[in-house]
Amino acid sequence: MATAKTSGFCLSTDAVAVTPSLAAFIERTDYNRVGNAKHWPPLSLSSVRFGLRFKVRGVLSSSPWSPPLTPPDVNGNGRSVPSKIRTQTDSEQRDSISLLNERIRREHCKRESQSSRPSMDSEEADMYIQLVKEQQQRGLQKLKGDRRSAASGAFSYKVDPYTLHSGDYVVHKKVGIGRFVGVKFDVSKASSEPIEYVFIEYADGMAKLPVKQASRMLYRYNLPNETKKPRTLSKLSDTSAWERRRIKGKVAVQKMVVDLMELYLHRLKQRRPPYPKSPAMADFAGQFPYEPTPDQKQAFMDVERDLTERENPMDRLICGDVGFGKTEVALRAIFCVVSAGKQAMVLAPTIVLAKQHFDVISERFSRYHNIKVGLLSRFQTRSEKETHLQMIKHGDLNIIVGTHSLLGDRVVYNNLGLLVVDEEQRFGVKQKEKIASLKTSVDVLTLSATPIPRTLYLALTGFRDASLISTPPPERVPIRTHLSAYTKNKVVSAIRHELDRDGQVFYVLPRIKGLEEVMEFLAQSFPNVGIAIAHGKQYSRQLEETMEKFAQGHIKILICTNIVESGLDIQNANTIVIQDVQQFGLAQLYQLRGRVGRADKEAHAYLFYPDKSLLSDQALERLAALEECRDLGQGFQLAERDMAIRGFGNIFGEQQTGDVGNVGMIFSLKCFLKVFPSTADYDNIDELPRNISPTDRNPLETINEAENAAEKDIWDLIQFTENLRRQYGKEPYSMEILLKKLYVRRMAADLGITKIYFRLNCFWNYQENSCSTGSSSA
Ligand SMILES: Nc1ncnc2c1ncn2[C@@H]1O[C@H](COP(=O)(O)OP(=O)(O)OP(=O)(O)O)[C@@H](O)[C@H]1O
C-alpha cells in the first residue's frame, strides 16, 4: 500500500479510492512509490483533491524542484501571464515522459512475447547484441554531431547590417528587440579614427554597435516578407526582461520540435503489414473518367507506395490548389485499404462537405456491391445514428464519412485502417490532438488546399510526407477576380451575366444576419429565379435539402455564409459574389473563390467592400494579395502572403505563438538547429539555473548523468528519469524538455537513424515560390 505524507495527514491509496481523480493521479505519477516520502513535496488536502494540479503554491515552494512549474513572466511588464504553455496541455498533466516510459515497456513486452526467435547459442547472441549496440552507438554519435553540420548548413540567420532598411526590427542577442536606424561613421572613445556603427533604437534610448560586432550579435526580427511588429522594444537599461523572453521562446520552440519528433519516431516504430497490391486497384483506377495530371499521377504513386511497400503507417499530406483533383488520390487510397478488409474513415470539416464526399464516394464505389459507404451526420435521427454506430462497430460499413463526430468516443471501429482528413486546419485543437493520436496506429492521408503555413512547413521539413499537386486539370481557366466597392447595380449585372449563360451563383456574406435582406433584394431583381438561403444554424434537413437542390441545379442563386467555404464542387456554379469581403481572412477568401471555376467555363469572383476608407491597412493588403494571386495554382503564394500579413509565428501553432513572437522568428528558428543537445549545448545552462535542477544539485551534473544514461541505452534513460522523479518529484518544465530530447535521440539511434536534419533550405525555396518537399533523412 502506498502512503503519501501530507501536512499533518497520512494518506494511503486505499483511503483515496473515494476521490477518483487522486487515484488516477497516483497511478499516473511516480509518487506512489514507497520509501520516498521524505523527498516529496508535502501535499495538502486541497492538493489531494485537485490531483496533479498542485493548487497550493505556498506548499509546493518547499519542493526540491524550485521554483515550481510556474513559467516566468514573458512580456516583461510585471504581469504574470496566464501562459498557454503553463495551462497548455492535458498531456502534460498526463506527463508525457511517464507515458512514454510505459509505452516503451509495453511495446518491448509485446515484441518479446510475439517474437518466435530461432535458438542461438549464447556466444552468437552476445556477438549479435554487441554488433547492434555498436551500431546504435555510432548512430548516437552521428546524431550528436549532426547538430554542428546542420548549424553550418545553408540557413544563415545572422544579419548583414548593410542589407537592413531603416525601421527594420532587429534582435540583439544580449539586449533584445530594437529598431534599426542606420549605419553611420562615428568616432569611438578609444580612437580618433571614425569607424562605422550600426544605430539601433530601443525603448529607452539609442545604441550604437560597431558594424563588425553587429554582424555577430544581430538577428533580423522578421523573416523575409514578414511585416510583424513586436509588441514592445527592449530596454537598454534592463535586459532581464529580454532574458526571460528569450528563454521562454527557446523552450517553446524546442518543446514543439521535440514533441513532433517524438510522434514522428513513434510512428516510424509502428509496424503494419503492407497492403497487398491487387489487380482490382488498377481496375478501380481505370474508372477515373479523366486523364490524371502528372502531379496527380505522382501523388497516386506516392500513396500506393506508402500503403503497399512500407511497413510504417502513412502520414502524407496532399497539397493541391482548390479544384486540382485531390479527391481522387484519397479515393484510390480508400480502395486499397478497404479491399484488403479494413475500414476507412473520411473526416470533413463541415456537414455539407461530408455529404458531398459521401455522394462522390458512393458514386465511385457503386460498382462494388460488397463495399458499403455510410454517412454519420447530425441530420440523422437518433435511431438512424444508432444503427450506423452499430454497423461501424460490427464492420458492416467499410467507408464511414462524417464530421468531427467520427472522432468521438461513441464511434467504435471494427477494423480501422485509413483516416482521410480533409482540410485539417479547420478542426479544433482537441480534434487535431485526436487525429495526431490516431497517426501512430492507422494510415493517415490529409488533403489541404490552402495549407496553413504550419502544415506546409512541417511537410516541407519532413515530419510528414507530402505530395504537391501544382498542375491544374487541363482546360481549367483562371478565375477572373473583380474587387470593387459595393453597388446594387454591379451585383445585379454580375448575377445576370451568369444566369444568362444558364449557370449558378454563390452569394456569400460573413454573417447570418444579412442573408434575409439580400434575399429580399435578389427576389425583387430576379423574380422567376430559384433562390435559397443556406447557413450552418439552419434546421438540418432544410440545409441538406437546399444543398441538394443547388447541386441538382434547381436553385440558381445560393445566398449563404462561408458554410460553402471548402471543398464544395458544383461545376455549373461559376460566379461567386462576396459581400463585405474585408471581414474574411485571406485563406478563407481563397477557398471561397475556389468554389467556382471547377470546370472548363470561365468563372468570376466579385469581391465587394463597403467603402475603401473603412478598410484597415491589413484588410487592404489582404485584398490586394488576393487580386494579384489570380492565376491557377497560386494557393501557395497566397499562403505565403498570409504568413507575411498574419505573422509567421503561426508555424508554431497556437500554443507556442506567443512565446515565439516575443523573441522573433529568426531567433526562434535558430533554436530549431539546436534541438539535439550535446553537452556543449548546455553552455548556456546558467541561463536556467534554478528551474532546471533541484536546488541542491548542480544542473550540469544532472544533465551529464542523463546524457550518460542515454548513451548506454533507453532502459538506462528510463531508469534515470524514474529515479530522478522518485527522489525529487516531477522535474520542472525546462528539464523535462532536455530529457525528452535525450529520449528522441536515443530512440532515433536505436532505430538505426544516424541523421536528423531540418531542411530549412526548402523553406527558403518555398519563400521564393518554388516548393519542393524536404525530408528528414534516416
Ligand atoms: N485530371 C482531371 N481532369 C479533369 N478533371 C478533373 C481531374 N481530376 C479531377 N477532376 C475534376 O475536378 C473537380 C475538382 O476535383 P476535386 O474535387 O478532387 O478537387 P480538390 O482538389 O479536392 O478541390 P478542393 O480543395 O476544392 O476540395 C472534380 O469535379 C473532379 O472530378
Image (cartoon, rainbow, N blue to C red):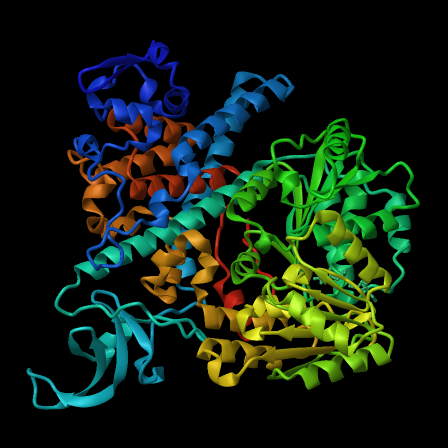
Q: Is residue 72 left or right of residue 717?
A: left
| Quarter of the image that includes the N terminus | top left
Q: Position of residue 374 (x, y in %)?
A: 79, 40
Figure check: 140 above or below 162: above
Q: Position of residue 312 (x, y in %)?
A: 64, 40
Figure check: 384 above or below 601: above
Counting the numbered discs, the total is 0
Q: Position of residue 670 (x, y in %)?
A: 37, 61
Q: Identify which residue, 482 or 218, lies in the foreground.
A: 482
Figure check: 349 above or below 20: below
**Which residue: 61% across, 67% down?**
514
Q: Identify which residue, 20 or 640, lies in the foreground.
A: 20
**Which residue: 25% across, 65% down?**
173
Q: Is residue 505 left or right of residue 366?
A: left
Q: Is residue 639 left or right of residue 508?
A: left
**Which residue: 80% across, 76% down?**
526
Q: Position of residue 599 (x, y in %)?
A: 82, 71
Q: Identify which residue, 773 or 392, lies in the foreground.
A: 392
Q: Identify which residue, 709 or 234, lies in the foreground.
A: 234
Query: Is residue 771 visible from the viewing direction of this image?
Result: no
Query: Is residue 254 visible from the viewing direction of this image?
Result: yes
Q: Which corner quadrant of the figure contains ligand 1?
A: bottom right
